[in-house]
Amino acid sequence: MEFETEYLQILKKLENIEVKNYQKTRNYLDGEVSFLSPYITHGVLPLKFVADFVIRKFGLKGPGNAEHFIFQLGWHEYFQKIWLDIGDKVLSPVKNPQKSVESLLIGKNLLEAKTGINVIDDSILNLYKNGYMHNHARMWTASIICNLHKTGFKAPADWLFYHLLDGDIASNYLSWQWVAGTFSSKKYLCNQENLNKYSKCKQFNTPIDKSYEEIAEMVDDPNYCLDLGQRVELELPVYIPDLPKLNLDLTGLKVSLFSIWTLDPNFAVDDESQKILLIEPGFLTKFKMSEKRINFILNLAKNIPGIEILVMDYDQFDLEFALKCTQVSAKFHPACSHWTNVDFTEADYIFPDINPPFRSYFDFWNKAKKYLEKEYAKTK
Ligand SMILES: Cc1cc2nc3c(=O)[nH]c(=O)nc-3n(C[C@H](O)[C@H](O)[C@H](O)COP(=O)(O)OP(=O)(O)OC[C@H]3O[C@@H](n4cnc5c(N)ncnc54)[C@H](O)[C@@H]3O)c2cc1C
């Protein structure tokens, strides 16, 4: 599985999307999922763009409709809006403390894809190779690490974020919290039978080849901890692209500023502005990303004609460039909240008027559904 970076190919991927069997099959590792997440995360395919396309193609209601797909897509927007609302608090327990944590360090066997649970090991190897892990595999992996290996969610969430091409601060950290029970009313549990069913594998006699009642007892038993080898400090090298220094003079120019989260080739496409992608070392030091991910981002940026790439924090850009430009405009993303002196265009949300606080995803979705029905009333 390879993730294309050329815009026309990405659009083709969207055009070829099928949702008829999505709800029925999405939990299976070979189910009908879209693989659009790296493009959605990086803003190449804005949420509203994807939703509009899918609803126009399949209709909101009726057999094989788009509603369940939009229900899942909505999670991305929901998480983004919570992040915007609570900021860095997404990195620590949001609702409840994480119970029964034995350590903040991760077992070496997990990092080396040697847990002995084949589906998990294969999913980790695939993550290292392709930068992708199926949603169900993410849930299983997170549950095994947090709830049975009894590890604080932050380090493993950093690890997954580092390797994913779709790593999104809000979706990643809040999903880990959802599994670990710190952003939900209870921990998410899984067993070997569930893994076997949805991966179509047949593995038995693993430490998780138990009933759900037994798994729940293991989770609650303070003396139980799944052995995943020696616990080690997570060592993720910071990767900051080393690009040639640009001799840019932006005096008197109109600039369209892109972040790594807003790489939409259609943004400001018809104006004469100088397009600049700002890659902020401060961000990449705090939220480390693999070299593969950074190269993926640099390739996605090539879809924006005439774009120049600056590797500097916003403060420096502001001092050196922003004040000399006639205007700096950008599409908003929660990760760019610190960009001052910028005229923001609103993010392309599907549900622009639905904002926190939300009691739960269903609270968000109930409002979102009504909005959808009104907004897309005329689609078949
Ligand atoms: C522990 C954990 C960590 C995760 N980390 C991320 C992350 O860093 N970035 C990320 O985009 N998703 C994350 N997810 C959510 C989900 O796993 C991925 O969005 C999904 O697997 C992407 O594959 P797809 O595009 O084929 O999904 P599809 O099933 O085709 O869904 C279409 C789109 O809807 C959105 N979506 C679907 N399900 C979810 C969900 N549960 N949460 C948020 N958005 C969703 C995504 O944008 C996705 O591309 C995480 C889930 C878990 C359990």
Image (cartoon, helix red, strand yellow):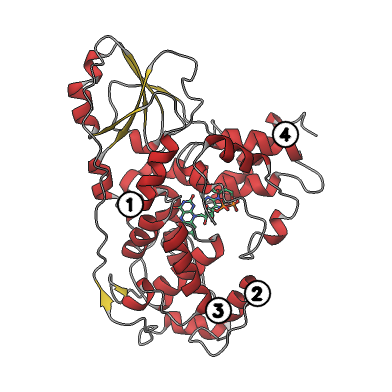
Q: Is mark 3 within 8 Å of ligand 1?
A: no
Residue beneath disc 1: 291
Q: Amino acid at mark 4?
A: Arg
Going by the numbered disc 2, the residue's amino acid type is Lys
Residue beneath disc 4: 56
For label 4, the SS is helix
Q: Residues within 10 Å of mark 4 (few under 14, many from 20)?
A: some
Residue at 71% across, 49% down: 19
Q: Quadrant of the N terminus?
A: bottom right
Q: Which residue is mark 3?
A: 191
Secondary structure beneath label 3:
loop
| Earlier residue among tags 4 and 3 | 4
Give the answer, above or below, for where 209 lies relative to 282. below
What residue would you read off at disc 2? 200
- The picture places residue 335, in percent across and down from the top left corner, at 35, 38
**Mark 3 or 1, nearer chain start:** 3
